[in-house]
């Protein structure tokens, strides 16, 4: 790059943006892909045929229904949203996080979340010009509730994000602690339930009890990551305002039609989810039998584990050499040193992963 051009870039692009690293997605090549919390199962062939038939009736020359009204009605029922609450749809829940940040952005506004957690809360807050305050979890990845409450008191966050279950740690925080945080927060608390399909608890019903609670879900982990569809449930008073930050037609016609079709076949999705939950238990036990590892309990479709000190990079590389891609978190900072995260795959993929781990660890 010429000197002049790099000076122009430096002058024009905000320092906060230049300081960021772009969200990085590694090229999986032909690896067994256990890095991104996807559902590994395709649809049965007859369901694919019926889906393609449905898509024949979709018009690509017209804009989509801007409110995605039919899909929204369907999701209100399918996601057990309490009566009287509304839904806002996003191009993935990532877009909903962005809409929330844009809606509250302003000088001195704070977004807060415990850390480690989903990295997009911090990244989107910074892009929107908000200050992000991360409050460290305890060593066992439970909430440090006194620290959260005093940070809330001191910093008066406009938004608090709580991932329930949390990514990348996999645990549900204690529900009682979450109630205390919602009660203490001066602004909105967003319960991000991306992994609800694999978890034993949800705050969806609690929406009725609080004015400042929103619950976010996604269809990504239910086997529809390619559709890009997230949903935010809560009171119309909030959602109506947040909706003003939404780009027109954010849910495209293919997503609207395909998501409704998929919900017509909810049983197939639910069976896949059930299989993943059962396989998670087996994967947990197989990893727990490896003496040098510490395994964290998971209510999601992935498992976080800690290797012996300094070994994570070599294990990650050893898996990659064997064509298995997981997530290396060991450079993500403080509490995640030596940590790796594996997504639950098919039984065959999980077996290949376990066999590779045994080989790498000389077991
Ligand atoms: N929230 C959490 C906690 C996540 O882990 C993820 C994705 N990994 C998302 C939200 C984003 O999901 P989506 O695919 O709906 O954008």
Image (tube, helix red, strand yellow):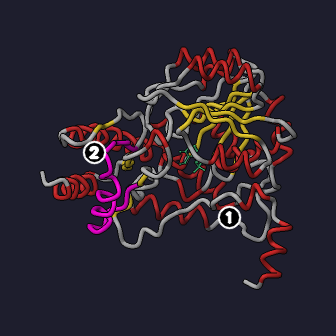
Using the image as rendered, state which of residue 44 and residue 250 is in the foreground.
Answer: 250
Which element carries disc 2, helix, strand or loop?
Answer: loop
Q: Is residue 227 above or below residue 194?
A: below
Q: Specify the label residue 58 is tagged with.
A: 1
User: Where residue 107 sits in the image (x, y, percent)?
Assistant: 87, 40
Please give the name of the residue rendered at 53% of the width and 18% of the height, measured from the top-left corner: 175
**What is the span of residues highlighted in magenta in the rendered image?**
302-327
Please give the name of the residue rendered at 37% of the width and 47% of the height, measured from the top-left corner: 338
User: Where residue 195 sits in the image (x, y, percent)?
Assistant: 49, 39
Please give the name of the residue rendered at 41% of the width and 45% of the height, measured from the top-left corner: 337
Q: Nearer the viewer, mark 2 or mark 1?
A: 2
**Neighbourhood count class around disc 2 (C-alpha, 10 Å): few under 14, some 14–19, many 20 upward:** few
Precedes in sequence: disc 2 or disc 1: 1
Q: Specify the label residue 115 is tagged with.
A: none
Q: Which residue is mark 2?
A: 308
Q: Is residue 91 above or below residue 254?
A: above
Residue 315 in sight here: yes
Left or right: residue 68 compared with residue 142: right
């Amino acid at each position: 790059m010429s000197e002049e051009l790099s000076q122009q870039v430096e002058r024009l692009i905000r320092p906060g943006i230049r300081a960021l690293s772009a969200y990085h997605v590694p090229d999986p090549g032909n690896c067994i892909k256990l890095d991104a919390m996807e559902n590994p199962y395709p649809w049965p062939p007859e369901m694919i045929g019926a889906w393609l038939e449905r898509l024949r009736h979709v018009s690509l020359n017209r804009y989509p229904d801007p409110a995605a009204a039919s899909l929204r009605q369907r999701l209100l029922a399918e996601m057990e949203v309490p009566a009287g609450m509304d839904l806002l749809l996003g191009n993935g829940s990532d877009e909903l996080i962005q809409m929330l940040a844009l809606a509250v952005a302003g000088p001195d506004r704070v977004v807060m979340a415990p850390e480690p957690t989903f990295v997009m809360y911090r990244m989107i807050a910074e892009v929107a010009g908000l200050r992000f305050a991360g409050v460290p979890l305890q060593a066992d990845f439970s909430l440090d509730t006194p620290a959260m409450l005093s940070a809330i008191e001191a910093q008066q966050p406009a938004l608090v994000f709580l991932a329930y279950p949390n990514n990348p740690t996999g645990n549900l925080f204690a529900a009682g602690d979450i109630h205390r945080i919602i009660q203490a927060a001066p602004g909105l608390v967003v319960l991000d339930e991306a992994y609800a399909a694999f978890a034993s608890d949800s705050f969806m019903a609690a929406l009725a009890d609080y004015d400042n609670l929103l619950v976010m879900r996604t269809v990504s982990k239910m086997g529809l990551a390619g559709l890009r569809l997230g949903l935010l449930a809560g009171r119309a008073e909030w959602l109506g305002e947040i909706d003003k930050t939404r780009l027109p037609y954010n849910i495209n016609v293919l997503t609207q039609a395909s998501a409704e079709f998929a919900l017509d076949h909810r049983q197939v999705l639910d069976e896949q989810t059930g299989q993943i939950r059962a396989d998670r238990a087996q994967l947990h036990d197989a990893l727990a039998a490896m003496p040098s590892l510490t395994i964290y309990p998971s209510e999601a479709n992935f498992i976080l584990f800690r290797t012996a000190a300094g070994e994570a990079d070599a294990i990650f590389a050893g898996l990659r050499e064997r064509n298995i891609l997981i997530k290396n978190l060991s450079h993500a900072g403080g509490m995640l040193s030596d940590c790796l995260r594996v997504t639950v795959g098919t039984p065959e993929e999980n077996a290949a992963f376990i066999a590779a781990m045994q080989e790498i660890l000389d077991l």
